[in-house]
Amino acid sequence: MLDTVDPAITMGKKEFERLREEKELKLGELQRQAHECGLPILLVFEGWNGAGKGVQINSLLQCLDPRGFKVHPISRPNCEEINRPFLWRFWTKLPPKGRIAIYDRSWYYQTTMDRVEERITREQAELAYHDIQSFERQLVDDGCLILKFFLHISAKEQKKRLRKVENDPEQRWRVTSEDWRAHELYARYWDAFEEMFRQTDTAFAPWHVVEAEDKRYSRIKIMDSVIAAVSRRLEEMKRNGKRADAVEQPYVEAVPFTTSILREADLSRSCDKKEYERKLPALQERLRDLQYEAFRQGVPLIIVFEGWDAAGKGGTIKRLTNSLDPRGYYVVPVGSPTDEERQYHYLWRFWRHMPADGIVAIFDRSWYGRVLVERVEGYAKQAEWRRAYREINEMEEHLANDRTILLKFWLHIDADEQLKRFKAREADPNKQWKITAEDWRNREKRPLYEQAIQEMFFRTSTRLAPWTVVESNCKYFARIKTLETVIQALEKRLK
Amino acid sequence: MLDTVDPAITMGKKEFERLREEKELKLGELQRQAHECGLPILLVFEGWNGAGKGVQINSLLQCLDPRGFKVHPISRPNCEEINRPFLWRFWTKLPPKGRIAIYDRSWYYQTTMDRVEERITREQAELAYHDIQSFERQLVDDGCLILKFFLHISAKEQKKRLRKVENDPEQRWRVTSEDWRAHELYARYWDAFEEMFRQTDTAFAPWHVVEAEDKRYSRIKIMDSVIAAVSRRLEEMKRNGKRADAVEQPYVEAVPFTTSILREADLSRSCDKKEYERKLPALQERLRDLQYEAFRQGVPLIIVFEGWDAAGKGGTIKRLTNSLDPRGYYVVPVGSPTDEERQYHYLWRFWRHMPADGIVAIFDRSWYGRVLVERVEGYAKQAEWRRAYREINEMEEHLANDRTILLKFWLHIDADEQLKRFKAREADPNKQWKITAEDWRNREKRPLYEQAIQEMFFRTSTRLAPWTVVESNCKYFARIKTLETVIQALEKRLK
């Protein structure tokens, strides 16, 4: 791709001055409109060392309201970031609705550098680019606008610039031996960048290569690109009345989605108290040992609990955590999103809680809410929850690529058992707090939930992150099965 | 203090078993009640190496719902934490309303260790303990419950325990040479702990020394302490009907609070366009150089902007940031708190945005909202905004102790100039977005705001963090003065 671009194009000073002011005003106006419409904008700046990313970002910012953007300089991951999947640091640096995030280098930095330094194979790079593609698509699908700029200069120009800075006594400190080394590796960088383009130049987030030897030309080109993309998007949003937030009717399948998985669950399975009390302590002790082992090996573990109301999630989580070292696990109770969380892609609020290496995170309800309650109650539009299956699989794959062990449990009880438990809770003054009107309402929608659950199993049970249905009419059985499943999975992976 | 405590007290197994179950049930019940009442609870565990903090925390957790607590193991600060004032990591680890945070070591760790290792003087330790006291008092005033446990064992017992673990081949890896060194320094630790008690054993957050050689005795004692404190607090809350969130009438002083500072501001001061255009670029360039210097020296800079509506905050911030390196500054626009932020002390949402070493954070409105809009509009109760002056001073002092440069600007215009600008905005289609009905309403309350502003100046203009009133009827003058003030402050500190 790069060989089709002449980085040396120039623009005369007169023309530049003629164009500049009008474009700057326009950009300021578009920023305000984007803010009003709640459009999140991501501006990515990549390119050669010395191509002037800093200068270009600075110029662009001149015409923007500094209260509406944030610049993220990206270099090597810090101590928090290095212990998590590589996209974590970018998920947590997304712009909320109506704001602009500017990345001085970005999620491309690490992979391209790793390729230049030959720390990873082509296949590993492909995996990373695949994850990046998914990341960008998810954001675009959610309404983000992504512009990716690549600032291009020739090897000759790069050398000239390094020399120039070196000859300035005030600036000299800015040139390091690494810069010269990068210059010597120009050809290798070229190959790495070409590979990056091939893998990530997509319709939803295309690369904009900017001829960057002449600062005037590149400045106007960048402004033009931002203006065009933002204007187009704002027009689209107005045309579609996206801000109306029209509520769709909850979706009901004409032909109910069925799988065999719920039907096959044998809810008569049980475990008597004596056996339970004999088995539990040994399992808990074993689990604690495995927790230490996972900690030593730096393997993160995520355990997701979903299930019917009153299926016993709380009690199971308690037995699971009872013997764990509390310094190494935490439970994330998931309710409705806060107003802050609503400013981002729906997966953002889970990324906030992803465990570092060696840590156990237990989700009491999870991202599956999107395809369960949000689907059934109509909180998510059909297009949104339909694409969520893929988004979830992609996220889980990304976690798995980072060695995370991910286990998902569905705590299953039948309608009769649920009724019995609801009534028992209402009768017990110590347990009344556990039962609300909402539980009764959800219960009435059981057929709709059953469809959603089965479709969820079908679309998101993967080899990397399988679902386990836990027959929970007998609580003792459910707890033992859950612990055994976790133990088996850990034993398999930690050996 | 410690010499009055016999760490070797024991409890028989029978008595323990008799007490345990009842207390565990009670704790579970109290956790639920605290959750319902929105009571945040902080449990701090400090003590000798090997005193069994982990074991005790674990026991306590057995009876709690894991969805309602989070355990924070505290050791050396990580790379994010080391670059910020030492309380930052604890501000960002507070429990939200209704949750429990458990600290396995805490904000006391660093200072006591520094004392043992003689890295800091007694005076420096006093400064740190002073900041810790303020921190705890602020939380307690805001409704948090803090319990601080110190697990006490003798030197002999410590040695015995280290030996025992070492003799177990499975556990041996847990004992390090550091543990033995700490044992040798038992006497020095003793002195450091005594100093800690003297400085931080307060009525609002007293220390509970737990005799920890016998696990049964200490377990019951810890449970008893938590039960007593939480029960008492819940009763108080019920008695005071704290959850009612009764709205107070906005407060009006009988005798208006006046200072000379606003009166003395000479709003006729101005700067003509020519002079402005001559001066501005040089100031901006100078500021950029100073930004690099602050970065090199690792000094954080916080600039706070407050001022009348339409006083020109946005424009001033823009000129201030125009030439700054965008990788080293960010602007924090402050509006009403999000629902997430409302779950914490009102300073929490600012702590989230405190800059790392070498970084510039610009607050467009700030924590002073508490004593301005929240006071005038009655969003904060009188007791709340009245204690905020002290809380703010304490926070700013803590920042200053960490070498932060903090500058606060009040952009001042008179009522006539404001009216002129409001009308001009309404007439200009490009600026109509800047003016809302709320601006007109605020304008009517100018006398109330004037009182609040003057009291704010009086109570929060400190040597470490002075207020600068910027005469802003002439925008050019205001911008030049602001930049000059920032430059002078930086020059003074960075020399």
Image (cartoon, coloured by chain):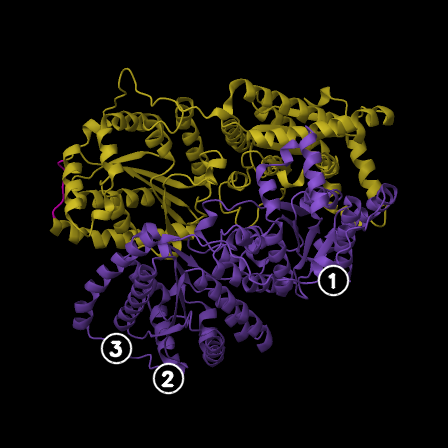
Chain colours: A yellow, B purple
Q: Residue B10's mark?
A: 3
Q: Residue at x 74, y 42 (%)?
A: B322
Q: Which residue is mark 2?
A: B4
Mark 3, secondary structure of its residue: loop
Q: Main secondary structure of the magenta part?
A: loop
- How far apart marks 3 and 1 lie (CA) works out to 57 Å
First-in-chain label (3 vs 1):
3
The quadrant the C terminus of chain B occupies is bottom right
Q: Secondary structure at mark 2?
A: helix
Residue A164 % position (x, y) = 84, 41
Displayed quadrant of residue A441? top left
Marks 2/1 same chain: yes
Which one is nearer the viewer's eye here, A171 or B287?
A: B287
Chain letter for mark 1? B
Residue A64 seen from this side: no
Eye-nearest disc, 2 or 1: 1
* For marks 2 and 1 on the same chain, the one whose residue lies earlier in the sequence: 2
From this viewpoint, which residue is outermost toward the front?
A: B254
Measure how far apart labels 2 and 1 are at the Cα level: 48 Å
Residue depicted at x 45% and y 35%: A347
Look at the numbered disc 1 and give the secondary structure of its residue: helix
When the figure is inspected, residue B212 is found, relative to residue A69, above or below; the finding is: below
Q: Which residue is mark 1?
A: B493
Q: Amino acid at mark 2?
A: Thr
- For label 3, the crowd category at 10 Å Cα-Cα, with few meaning under 14, some 14 to 19 and many 20 or more, is some
| Discs 3 and 1 lie in a common subunit | yes
Q: Which residues are magenta?
A: A268-272
